[in-house]
């Protein structure tokens, strides 16, 4: 899989990917940051593991099974549009929370749509887009569990095979995939991601909580 | 507290209220249904308990600390409007999920608002409205726990004292109140309630799951 971005979510997703024995390529506008994260991931791997991770010296995504946009919105929209035809054959995974970060009091996409739907329609027509991981924070996702339970990964997309590829990745990484259906459910996933974020400070949760459909 | 409605959510909320030693009045357009539910709640009370529950022979809500609208949307909007000035001094608790029940594929309020905000603006101006309990299903709420954990009760409203009254009620009933802030957060709570409902059949959860911010 290819992860676009070298921040905290990129690190956590790559850690889950390596735990699931996926090969990981990290790309970033700064090749140095991509290489540094790859180095750190190799150093952090369990003894005896042979993590297949590398930073790319290009922004290339060709040939990737999964391309994860681990950059904030709306940067991810622009990045996906730049890739264009290079995404053919890949599943594009949108993990963003399009939130007004200045206030943490509203969304940065108009009501009645979602960042995922905009990316699918405007930036990557013809490429299967899957919304996932946006209700997980980077901290809990790094280890994959909270309170002894695997994190739920809520997955939405219009292509069943693409949803399944993302679910398989989540399961391989020790997480609990939940396929919630079509891409328009991203509206609710993004509302939930925003609610979870907006509640952290007032509830004193310290960005360590995990949204779970407890059973 | 007064519960408007005598269905499954009314039963579960009344059960939590009685567990918290709140006095409960049940009102319904059918006084017989209200009386029957009150009888059933008395019968279901633990041995030695003295449940203070009665069905009302009127639709009266005067003098109630909390008035819970346990009827579907948009019926609750009409009921609140009928009460009008009778709600003075009460906190009005909206628990509905304004979902298109024919398809379970969309909301029954326009994007960018919420049933709770409409009730506050159109039906009960001047009365503090609190959104709560809409992410809980009746089954899990009856016992108050899932997987050994108390249910989270997500609470939104513009009046801090009103939110606190609802939080105190939830805590008394053995639940875990989470105050998520202003009434406009009801948009996200209703999106989450809808997501939770829409996911039940496809995930095989059988309406027995509970939304939790796991820590």
Image: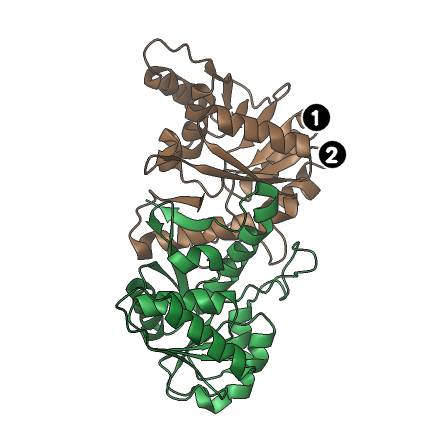
Chain colours: A brown, B green
Chain name for mark 1 = A
Image mark count: 2
Residue B182, labelled with which disc? none
Residue that protrudes farthest toward the bottom in the picture: B85
For the residue pair A12 and B28, the one nearer the viewer reads as: B28
**Image coords of residue B16 (percent x, y):** 36, 65
Q: Secondary structure at mark 2?
A: loop
Answer with the quarter of the image where residue B147 lies.
top left
Is the residue marked by circle 1 packed among few (<14), some (14-19), or many (20+) residues within 10 Å?
some
Residue at 45% x, 22% y is A34
Can I make out residue B173 in this image?
Answer: yes
- Rendered position, B92 above or below A118: below
Q: Mark 2 vs mark 1: tell me if same chain.
A: yes
**Image coords of residue B168 (percent x, y):** 29, 68
**Tag 1 or tag 2, which sits nearer the N-term?**
1
Residue at 30% x, 46% y is A206
For the residue pair B89 and A93, the one nearer the viewer reads as: B89
**Image coords of residue A191 (percent x, y):** 52, 53
Residue A88, labelled with which disc? 1
Kindly report the distance in space between the C-alpha atoms of the residues bearing marks 2 and 1. 8 Å
Q: Are marks 2 and 1 in contact (CB under 8 Å)?
A: yes
Residue A126, labelled with which disc? 2
Chain name for mark 2 = A
**Image coords of residue B195 (percent x, y):** 56, 51
């Amino acid at each position: 899989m290819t992860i676009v971005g070298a921040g905290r979510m990129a690190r956590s997703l790559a850690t889950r990917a390596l735990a699931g024995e996926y090969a990981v390529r990290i790309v970033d506008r700064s090749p140095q940051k991509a290489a540094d994260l790859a180095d750190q991931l190799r150093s952090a791997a369990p003894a005896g593991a042979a993590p297949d991770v590398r930073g790319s010296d290009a922004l290339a995504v060709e040939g990737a099974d999964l391309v994860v946009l681990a950059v904030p919105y709306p940067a991810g929209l622009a990045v996906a549009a730049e890739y264009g035809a290079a995404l053919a054959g890949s599943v594009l995974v949108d993990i963003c929370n399009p939130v007004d970060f200045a206030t943490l009091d509203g969304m940065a996409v108009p009501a009645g749509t979602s960042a995922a739907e905009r990316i699918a329609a405007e930036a990557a027509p013809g490429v299967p887009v899957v919304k996932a991981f946006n209700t997980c924070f980077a901290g809990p996702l790094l280890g994959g569990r909270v309170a002894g339970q695997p994190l739920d990964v809520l997955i939405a997309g219009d292509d069943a095979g693409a949803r399944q590829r993302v679910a398989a990745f989540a399961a391989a990484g020790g997480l609990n995939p939940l396929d919630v259906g079509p891409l328009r459910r991203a509206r609710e996933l993004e509302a939930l991601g925003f609610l979870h974020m907006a509640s952290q400070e007032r509830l004193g949760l310290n960005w360590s909580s995990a949204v779970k459909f407890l059973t």
